[in-house]
Image (cartoon, grey):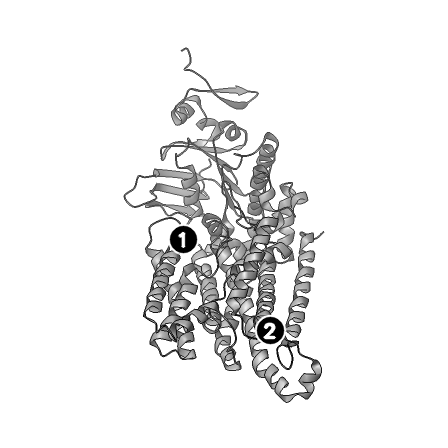
Amino acid sequence: MSRHEPLIAARDLTFAYRRGGPDVLRGISLEIESGTITAVLGPNGSGKTTLLNLLLGWLQPQKGQIELGGRPHHSYSRRALSRTVGLVPQDEHATFDLTVSEYVLLGRAPYLDFLEMPKSGDRELALQALKTTGLDTLRERSVSSLSSGERQLATLARALAQEPQILLLDEPMSHLDIGNTRRILRILEAMKERGQTIVFTTHDPNIVASVADSAILLKEGRLLASGPASAVLDAHNLSATYGVPVEVIRINGRLIVLATATEKGA
Amino acid sequence: MPLTPGRNKSSRRLWWIIGIVLLTLVLSLLTGRYPRPILTPLKALLENDLARNLVLNLRLPRIVAAFMLGLVLSASGAVFQMIFRNPLVDSGFLGVSQGAAFGASLGIVFLGGAAWAVQASAAFFALLGLAASYFLARRIRLGGWVLRLVLAGIAVAAIYSSGTGGIKYLAEPSRQLPDITFWMLGGLWGITWPDILHILPVVVPSLIIIYLMRWRLNLLSMRDETVFSLGVLPGRERLVLLVAAVASTAAVVSKAGQIAWVGLIIPHIARRIVGSDAQKMVPAAMLLGSVFVLFCDDLARTALSGEIPLGILTSLIGTVLFLGLLISRGLGARQ
């Protein structure tokens, strides 16, 4: 990472869901540069989703603080914050059967006043987001009739319509086949090209190796390693994170991560 | 290329519903039991002073009241269902209906039973139900905000119901108990122009607020992190909509008594016709609610020589419609 001021700076974050309860995150400090893709890796329950919700401002740390563009969360109005940070949560769904286009249009909410309805410009941006995600042919289908992968793309389309400076994605590839995974990765790379900053959680180190500039490894709420993805993704760090033997090989300059069945030489 | 070709279809359907509302209003005006059963001839309105007076001073205020009752109950039902992300709730949640029943019973038994006392007491305790549910929900330490409100509402409703039971037990059986029972069955037989003027200052602003904020109901029906990430102030916006829904419901229920099923069933029918987007669904539900209540009230005052309590008809017809919806295609919401 370069030495100029990071877009996201978290210092010494500690968070528990209830007072006196166990810390879900402890002493996390990290910096994320503007216009980069950062992956958060860690086993189930390591605090990845909690970290995203803290960066979103939805959860408040008990200790430490987060700055976006050099300003703490609370200095942003709610609408200004939602234009700065967007979220693609896991397994998002609408209670009532909105069509895909109505659902994606909700992403324009940060740009609408309290009593304002979406206008033609908002609908145009929602349509572009649908085209980018390849969902424009499904736009009159109800969201609940989509496959889980298509629903994930619809949620990403909503986030695209939101046009946030920083996009947080919670395991965005978890329900997707290879084709849709590649499509999402291409969209994330295109967002990065436009100067947007992406932070996503995942269980797949190979996805991190293929797309991320930086990686953050979490284990049991603590930061195990962070930095350039190529440096963080080594056999020692990944073995320590997941508690299983991991082999990292390089083929034509690309990192490939393999979880091996037994210890080397065993 | 339009983003949603279905939007034009929904708009056309809304215009059809407006046409049906106008037709129902005219037919309701011409339906009654004077000067002869069922249809009032136009000639009688022009030539018969008594018929004209009756239509203008008894039938017309009642029709306006039925229209408003339908607008309010279905708009409030839509608000409750979307805010609580639950297709099976209406104003019975948060202790509003039970508060009104408790207040009316209290008015009948302990405040002399005058119409104004019963109505004021019903409205007061309905609003108190909302306030009690809200403050109780803030103290509950279980689940998210929506679940806490629902739990608090169940508790407040139960307390009110036991209070109403106690008042009925104390009521004088030959006069007060039948009054309580009749109020709970609901009806518009005593509605006058002054009654309508009393509730207009609450009903009109509440309906305007719900109508103007209707698109945001789509946002408020999403889960809390999403609502937050889209820049919504969920607590404040939900509170504004809830106060509008409850205040208007309390106002109409204070005049009409308990009218069940309108708020539950009509938003579902509206979703079937124009889709689930609240921008279209809320106006469609309001208009369909007014048609439904007008139709039921026309039946209530003309089917028999005596009055049938409106609440009985809305429950009966509403239940049949509800079962029809469930059997034919479900409720248009996630299970």
Closest to the camera, between mark 2 and mark 1, is 2
In the structure shown, which secondary structural element does the residue marked by tag 1 occupy?
helix
Give how far across and how far down residue B268 sits, in percent: 57, 56
Along the viewing direction, whichever of A265 and B214 lies nearer the viewer: B214
Q: Earlier in the sequence, mark 2 or mark 1?
A: 1
Location of residue A156 with respect to B16 vertically, above or below: above
Chain bearing mark 1: B
Along the viewing direction, whichever of B203 and B210 lies nearer the viewer: B203
Location of residue B278 with respect to B120 vertically, above or below: above
Gap between marks 2 and 1 measured at Cα? 46 Å
Label total for image: 2
| Three-letter amino acid code at the position of disc 1 | Trp
The answer to whether dots 2 and 1 both sit on one chain is yes
Q: Which residue is mark 1?
A: B145
Along the viewing direction, whichever of B258 and A250 lies nearer the viewer: B258
| Three-letter amino acid code at the position of disc 2 | Thr
**Residue at the top extreme?**
A265
Give how far across and how far down residue B237 sits, in percent: 46, 60
In the structure shown, which secondary structural element does the residue marked by tag 2 occupy?
helix
Give how far across and how far down residue A10 sits, in percent: 39, 42
Q: Which residue is mark 2?
A: B302
Res. A112 in view: no
